Image: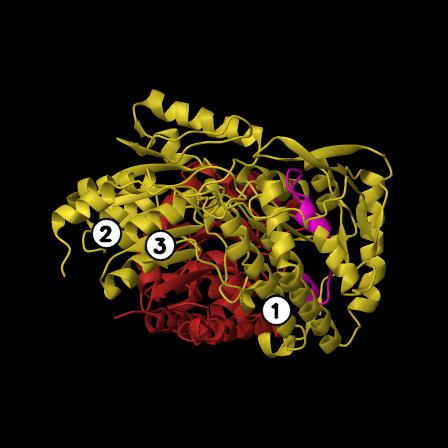
Amino acid sequence: MAITKKQTAELAKQVFEYAPAPEAIDHIKIQPRYGLFIGGRMVDAHGKKRFPTINPATEKTLSEVAEADGVDVDRAVKAAGKAFDSWSHLSASRRARYLFRISRLIQERSRELAVVETMDGGKPIKESRDVDIPLSAAHFFYYAGWADKLEWAFPNRKPRPIGVAGQVIPWNFPLLMLAWKIAPALAAGNTVVLKPAETTPLSAMVFAEICMQAELPPGVVNIVTGAGNTGFLVVSHPHVKKVAFTGSTEVGKLIQRAIAGTGKRLTLELGGKAANIVFEDAPLDQAVEGIVNGIYFNQGHVCCAGSRLLVQESIAEPLLEKLKRRLSTLRLGDPLDKNTDIGAINSRAQLEKIQGLVESGVEEGAELYQPECVLPERGFWFPPSLFTNVSQSYRIAREEIFGPVLSVLTFRTPNEAVEKANNTPYGLSAGVWTDKGSRILWMAERLRAGVVWANTFNRFDPTSPFGGYKESGFGREGGVHGLLPYVELT
Amino acid sequence: MDVRKTYKLFLNGEFVRSESGRAYRPDGSVNVPRGSRKDLRDAVRAARTAFPGWAARTAMNRGQILYRAAEMLDGRAAQFLELLGGGVRARRELDQSVEALVWYAGWTDKLPQITGTVNPVAGPYFNFTIPEPTGVVAIVAPEESPLLGLVRRLAPALCGGNVVIALAAESSPLAALTLAEVLATSDVPAGVVNIISGQRKELLPTLASHMDVNAIDVAGCNGNEVKAIEESAAGNIKRVIKLTQREQSPHLIAAFMEMKTVWHPIGV
C-alpha cells in the first residue's frame, strides 16, 4: 500500500525517543599515569613534568601524562637511531610480519581502543568504533604488504629507508593519524619518534602496549607525549631525517620555516576549507546525508570537512529546508552513547575558537541557524550550526573553523561553482553531488584539491592517497604514493 | 661589421628590456638586462594567466612542442656551442640538453600511466589517482652548465603542464636568454616560459616569497640560498624541489605535480 504524502509528512514530524545506550567502560583500564615509550619500554620522563588529559565530555581527568623535554626527545631519537641500523637491515618479509601483527592486535583490541579514543577525544563511539579503529588496522595491514614489495613500487630505482622519522599528529583522529604516520614509515624500513596531540595521548599509549605485545624490536617506535614545544623538539632534532606533520596550516608554516636548510625531508598535511558542491540534478536526500557527514562528522574536527556548501540556486530552498530538518534530528550528547551523532568538542580552547568564528559570522551579517538542542552542563559542546547569507569574504567562508559549522553559498553555473570552490588558499578536498557522471569528471578535473569525492564525502581507504594542494600541504598519505615520502631513491 | 644582438628578458612571449632599465655585464662586454622584482611580478602574472591553457593542452601536443624545442635547439647548435665556450664540454652540454628535451617530450603522454593509480577501495567507488601540474614553478638555473642545468628542470616542469619563471645563471646568462629564442619558435604559448636575468641576491627572495608561485626548484642553488628560500617558501607552503641536478626521471616530473584522487560513485 502506497504511503500518502500526508502520512509521510506526519512521519517526518514524529519524534523518536532513544533510550540511553552507553558503551560499557568497566573493562577499560586507563592507568592513572603514563610515562614515555622509548627504546621498547615505558620510561619516566626526565623532567618529571606531567599534564592531565581530560574527557572533554565530562571535564574529568582520565590520566596524567608525561611531558617530554629536550633530554627525553633526544633519548627517543637516539633509541630510534640505534634501532634503525637493525630494522633497516631486517629482511623485508620480517618487517612485514611485524606490521601484520600490529594490524591484528589493533583488531583484537578494537573495542578497548574505540572506547579510549572516544573518552579521550570526545568523538561519538559509533565513529571511533566504525571508522577510526577499523581504518587504523586496515592501514597497517595495507602497508605491511608493501614492506617486502618496495622494488615493485619504484621500478628502475633502489628504494632505501631515510632514517629516523619525526612525526607530529593532531587530536581529531588520534589513532588513525598515528597509523597513517607509522605504518608507511616502518614498512619502508625507517624508525620513528611520534608525538601525539596533547589532548589525545591515550590511544597512542595503548598503541605502545601493542608494540610491546607485538614484540616489535625496541626503539623502532618511540612515543613522546607533550605539547607544541615537545613537537618542535622532535621535528628540529638534528638526527631526525624526515619530518611528517598533520595539523594546522599555521603550525605547518612554522615547521617548514624551522627546518629550512637542514636537508630534512618534509611532508605536511594541513588545513582545509573544502567546498561541497550540490547540483540541481543531485538526489537531494542522499546529498543531505552527505552534507551532514561532510561537516558534522567528528564535530567538524576534520581537515577535509565540507565546510563550504555550494548549492545551485534553483534547489537552494528545498535543499536547505531538508538540511535544517535533518539537523534537528541529530543527537548531541554523551559520546559513549551508541546513538550519539555529535559528541563533545575536543577542548575548551577549540570550543572558544569555534565560538569566536561563529560570532564573527553573525557580526559580518550572515544568518545563523541552529536546531533546538540541549547542551549537557559539563563538558565542551557546540550545536550543529549552519550559516546562510554568507559572502565569500566573510571569515566563516575563508578560515578553517574546525567545528560543526557550515557556511552555505549559492551558484548558478558549473563554472561559477568551480570559481568559488577554488577561491581559497587551501586545496585539500572537495565534494560534488550530481547524477551526471560526465559532470563529476568535468568538475573533478577543475577543482584544485587533492581529494574529490563525488556523491559521497569524508571517505577514506588505506589504498587511496590523501593530501593537499596549495596551502593544505604537500605529500600524500595512503596508497603507493604514501611510500614515497619515506624512501630515498638511488 | 657585425649586427650585434641586444639581449632581452623573455616575458609573456615577448623579448623585453627590464622595466627598471638596468643592465649588467657578466662577462665584462655584453650588456644583459638586470631584471627587477617588478619584472618577476609581471612574469608571475603572465605565467598564471597562461597556466590553464597550457595545462589543458593534450599530452601529445605538449610532447610535440617539447620535441620542437629540441629540434630548434639542435638547429642552433653552432650558436649555442659558441655561447657555451666551445670545445668538448660545450658539445656535451648541448647534446645532453637536446637529449633531455627529447626524453621529456616522450613522457608527456606516459606520465599518468606510470605515476597514476587505480585504488581498490572498500566500497562502491571507482577510485583513481592522477598527476596534475602544480601551477607556477620557479626554476633557478645553476651557474655551472647554465644551459643543461636549466633545461634539465625546465623540460620536466613543462612536461607535466606547469608554467615556469626561470632565473638565468647570473654569471653566464646568455645561453638561457638565447634558449628563449628556441622556445619562442617552438609554439610554446606566451607566458608558459618566462626567462629573467639579473642578480640572484636581488631576485631570489622575491621568487621564494611570492604568494602566487606554487613551487620552486633549488637544484641550482647553494646551501645558504636553499635555507633562505625554504624559509620564505613557508609563507604559502611552496613545494621546494631539491632532487639532485642529475635526476632525470618520472619522479622529477612528478615532483612538479600534485596527485589528485577522485572517488567516482558506482551504481545504477
**Which label is found at residue A284?**
2
- Residue A347 horizontal side relative to residue A26, left or right: left
Say which element carries label 2.
Answer: helix
- Residue A156 horizontal side relative to residue A365, left or right: right
Badge 2 or badge 1: first in the primary sequence: 1
How far across and how far down the image is residue A172, in percent?
55, 44
Say which element carries label 1.
Answer: helix
Q: Circle 3 is placed at which residue position? A: B51
Front-lying residue, B56 or A123: A123
Q: Which residues are magenta?
A: A184-205
Disc 2 residue type (three-letter) = Leu
The answer to whether marks 2 and 1 sit on the same chain is: yes
Q: Circle 1 is placed at which residue position? A: A141
Task: Kindly give the residue lying farthest to the top in the view shown.
Answer: A363
| Quadrant of the frame with the N terminus of chain A | bottom left
Structural crowding at the residue carrying mark 1, measured as other residues with C-alpha within 10 Å and reported as few (<14), some (14–19) or many (≥20): many
The magenta stretch spans residue A317: no
| Residue at 83% across, 46% down | A74
- Residue B18 horizontal side relative to residue A46, left or right: left
Q: Is residue A266 visible?
A: no
| Chain letter, red in picture | B
**Which label is found at residue A434?**
none
Q: Disc 3 versus disc 1: distance between alpha carbons?
A: 40 Å
